[in-house]
Amino acid sequence: MWPRAILLVDMNAFFASVEQQDFPELRGRPVAVTNGLEGTCIITASYEARAFGIRTGMRLPEARRLCPHLIRRPSRPHRYAEISARIMNLLREEITPDLEVFSVDEAFLDLTRCQRLHGPPPVIAEKVRTLIRERIGLPCSIGLSGDKTTAKYAAKLKKPDGLTVIPPWEAAERLADVPVTELCGIAEGIGRFLAAHGVFRCGDMKKLPVSVLGRRFGHPGRRLWLMCQGLDPEPVHTDVPPPKSIGHGKVTPPETRSRRTLVVYLQHMCEKVAARLRRHGLEARHFLIALKTRETWLGGRYRATRPTSRAPDILALALRMLNEHWQGQGIWQVQVTALDPAPARLQPDLFEDPQETGASTDARLEGVMDAVNRRFGDMTLVPARLLDRSPMPDVIAPAWKPFGHRRTL
């Protein structure tokens, strides 16, 4: 038995694989997924497309120069989220409840406690890969080690449909010649700091006193020191903490200078934030409302007169921001975020006049809208202005989870 066993499941070219599964005529062919028919940035590509040099983030015209017969598929985020939820529930029910959803196509499993039930960790890892292939029909790569960082590194060594095992007692040696920037969590900025101190590969880290990283980065610095030696102490987090914020943003057409278009986009985000607050019985009083120009962000924090989950209240703040900060600059993105979501009041304020606020009527109207949209799909019933909203589909939030307040697009 391993003293600690952590497994990472990484679904291979997940969105493209779902497209090929749902549309058999795409199997074995180069497929690129973009955000709708208007989006030109490739979200992911099938392995057949990657063989031509096509990669995530590449623009469609460039990709088609590399692969003229490339097949473009508009993304279907609701379908991907549905499949992801099935995968996560399958792993939780069949393997272990000690599971952390890391992203829509990745999950960490702590196998330490289930070895007596399922067998040695390598046997469990193969069982996981077979389970996903047979029940879901999609390929995945698996990394297995004694800590999260080494498991994640291992998972990318054999793609697609691979299994890499790095026993915890071999982790330090296996990582010794790996560049530190290959590890999850060590981006270019941290990499430059480490390089300045003579740390280029993981094996160099033990020459650097841990106190140097502690002084510069605090507790995360001490974790970095251990990560490079295959000793990442970070546990698998099975819980989803209460929301510190709830927000939605959307990319606008490049250099948007139309006030009417900006109002539509802002109202769209206000409606989504408000509906999500209501869905989880939350209200907020402080909001971050912002517009992104080519160089910077415009806007700031705004305070409502009372905690709210009503879109008109949030939109009033957004229009105020627009009047105060926007002077006709070209805009690339809008963002609306509730900064302090908290459980909604069960009773109205004793000194609040429902006739004056329209609270009772608004609550009934919003309840009807929410019921319709839950049954027939988000934004089925919307204010008339939003009939002109962006035709590009929603995207899956980086912090997406298959349950609770983070199950959102």
Image (spheres, helix red, strand yellow):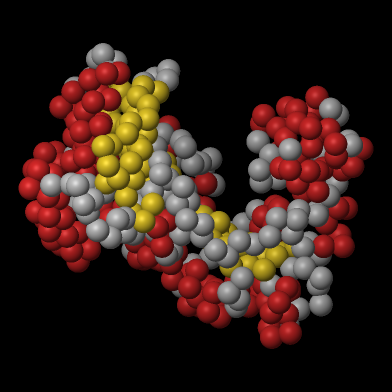
Q: In the orientation shown, which residue stands out farthest toward the right?
A: 207
Image coordinates for residue 356, horizontal then vertical, percent: 9, 43
Among the 4 quarters of the image, the one containing residue 385: top left
Among the 4 quarters of the image, the one containing residue 15: bottom left
Image coordinates for residue 268, horizontal then vertical, percent: 23, 41
Question: In this orientation, which residue lies closer to the viewer: 119 or 246?
Answer: 246
Left or right of residue 226: residue 19: left
Q: Is residue 69 visible?
A: no
Question: In this orientation, which residue lies closer to the viewer: 47 or 214?
Answer: 214
Image coordinates for residue 311, horizontal then vertical, percent: 21, 44
The residue drawn where x is 79% and y is 28% is: 195
Q: Is residue 354 visible?
A: yes
Among the 4 quarters of the image, the one containing residue 262: top left
How many numbered dots are placed on residues in this image?
A: 0
The residue drawn where x is 40% and y is 41% is: 339
The residue drawn where x is 37% and y is 65% is: 82
The residue drawn where x is 67% and y is 55% is: 152
Image coordinates for residue 297, horizontal then vertical, percent: 40, 23
**Quarter of the image where the N terminus is located:** bottom right
Left or right of residue 37: residue 355: left
